Amino acid sequence: MAYTFSVNNIPLTGSVAVYQLVSTLISAGWLKKMDSDGTTYSSTGVQVTSGNVGTNGLGNSNAWVRLQSPPTNGGTITNQTREITFQRGTTDLVWRVKYSASALFTGGSPGISQTPSSTDEIFMSGGGTDASPTFFALFNTNQTYHWNVACGGFADGYSFIGWSVAAGNIFGSATNIFLDVMAAGTYPSTDVDPAVMHCDNATSIFNVIFSSSFPTANVTNPALARAWLGATSAAGASLTSNSVNVGMMAQSSFGKSTFISTNPWTNKNNFYPAMWGSNFSSPKGIKGFSTLFKFPAITRISLTTYGVASANAKDIISTGQIWVPWDGSDPAL
Amino acid sequence: MAYSFSTGNTPATASLAMYLLKTTLVTAGWTVTSDSDGTTYNATGGQVTSGAGGAGGLGNVLAWIRLQAPTVGSNTREIIIQRNSSVATAADDQLWRIKYSANAGFTGGSPGATRTPSATDEVIMIGAGTDASPTFFQFFGANGGYRWHIMAGGAAELYSFATVVLNSTTTNIQSFIALDVLKSGTYPSEDVDPAVFCTITATIITHPPPSNNSTNPSNSRAWLGATSAAGNSLVSNNVNVGLDKYAQVGGASSLAVNPFSTKDTLWSPLWIAISTNPSRSPFGIKGASTIFLMGSVVRSNLDTITSVGTRDLICLGNLWFPWDGSVPTA
């Protein structure tokens, strides 16, 4: 797994946490296309250089960044580039996050306190309009959590996750922001956007997005895990709507909170990719299989690490009931 | 998929059915290494040349064939099929004994005209007794009452194969034989035999997967091969496994077609042994199937799907098997 990591952080503020995510995404290949520190707008994305307060900082009211992924292929769109905007509210805790599957944030009237728009944009966190945005408390009180970022490279479809764990509380997972690009071969080539985008701040988020049944209705602000994104006009004839909540599903006999066994030959845990799907009236069905998340044969407590590539690699970590890439370090609590 | 097929057969006897299996496996790359028509034993194979009765036929008392797959990884798998010891009635043709060797090969024992060789790692899949005094199991239904479909994979499919007895009236699976060599990367390199061998007389999927072993027939067995080669943690081997589904989809649980492609979503299911029986070991995830696919929509037996090629998959017992492109008939 060619992931780029920034883990075990205790960021001073939510703005610093978001900037750590931004800088790690850039290290993994993403581009910062536009930004504003809340006072000065840059149409080429060179204004925001830290998560601090003041000039060039993301820690200012209405400061924002526009990020663009490197191109990927596999769905309908050749060289698909996904984009995300992060905009800070009046505090470090509240944020507005938008996602564009491919149309890009090239519209609207971007400026010092206004993000650009996209014809296929989805609100993941916050609401309102670009001119009058509203925000969602995506982060908890500053310095009360560890912040972990894992950003995939080309082989991982540039999937990424930023996730926090309440300091001293192993069960206190909170902020979760991720893009999970589906594994090759698990979705049709006619899929406009073979990916799932997610934002939330909840202690039991993974209980929300995976269960014994797929979701049947949408929730908003935060949007949780959304799929079948991209332009409705590009949807197939059978796809009368898009942007619906999806859930992760484990095997019938094990996974999630039910364990089966380590492998009898190796005594090691077995992992397999999670399935994404929805049970809406439309679109309904299996979205694809995760690149980012894996279910285990044996459930382990949060922050347990494991070696997949080699015995002591610590290259995967439990977030409770699902496992995400890890950098090999000992996780901090 | 480089499969060799023999489908839609209505063999006059079970011996003819088994001979079709033999010829299809040979076409796919397998070798007959020894055999007997019940009267004459050939230590290098070549004695059995038909499924009929009489000289050179498999349709004789205690006739048998030893088949060897091309080597995959470090495994050279073998199977032996032997016909029943009686010819008193037509039904006698329907009883068989099948043995499987994961790697040791059937090079032991005292093979002869009516006696199969033995292997140090052999597992009796149907039938019982000894090579000198074998007993048999009724694997086939009444002659003419079933279709016999055979799908034999090549090198890309790791020489996995399946053959199905399909009731001509109900189109339900009566019984089937399969060797499912697991997909690369879904099992550890320490696995002595990354494969599942099946001799089943019912539909393939059971939920939850079995927690006890069954014998004669042995159903779907895994963790085969020599116990002596087992890891420290593997105190026994040869246990029943089953194909697992997802909680809301797969097997008999239907969800939907993909909204973009309007096609069924298909995936390779996992073979597992569940851990609710602590007296039985090993258990866990064996690996992912090569030959079977599970789907997002429950379909009827004999439904086909055009996946890569025209009608290249067929629904049998809530699973998708490789198919030859023909229009299946009941």
Image (cartoon, coloured by chain):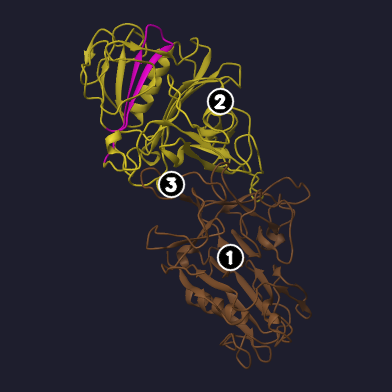
In terms of image quadrants, where is residue A300?
top right
Q: Chain of mark 3?
A: B
Q: Chain of mark 2?
A: A
Secondary element at tag 3: loop
Horizontal side of A189 relative to A116 (left or right) equals: right
In the figure, B187 relative to A63: above or below?
below
Q: Are marks 2 and 1 on the same chain?
A: no
Q: The chain shown in yellow is which?
A: A
Horizontal side of A197 relative to A103 (left or right) equals: right
Residue at the disc numbered 3: B257
Q: Is residue B172 magenta?
A: no
In the figure, A76 relative to A34: above or below?
below
Task: Inspect the image, locate mark 1, and give the three-letter code of the amino acid beneath it.
Answer: Thr
* Mark pair 3, 2: CA separation: 41 Å
Identify the colour of chain B in the image. Answer: brown
| Residue A68: % across, % down | 29, 28
Residue at the disc numbered 1: B170
Task: Inspect the image, locate mark 3, and give the three-letter code of the amino acid beneath it.
Answer: Val
Magenta stretch bounds: A79-102
Q: Residue at x 60, y 43 (%)?
A: A252
In terms of image quadrants, where is residue A230?
top left
Residue at the disc numbered 2: A331
| Residue A276: % across, % down | 47, 38
Does residue B188 appear in the picture of this structure? no
Name the mark nearer the viewer: 3 or 2. 3
Q: Chain of mark 1?
A: B
Secondary element at tag 2: loop
Q: Residues within 10 Å of mark 3 (few under 14, many from 20)?
A: some
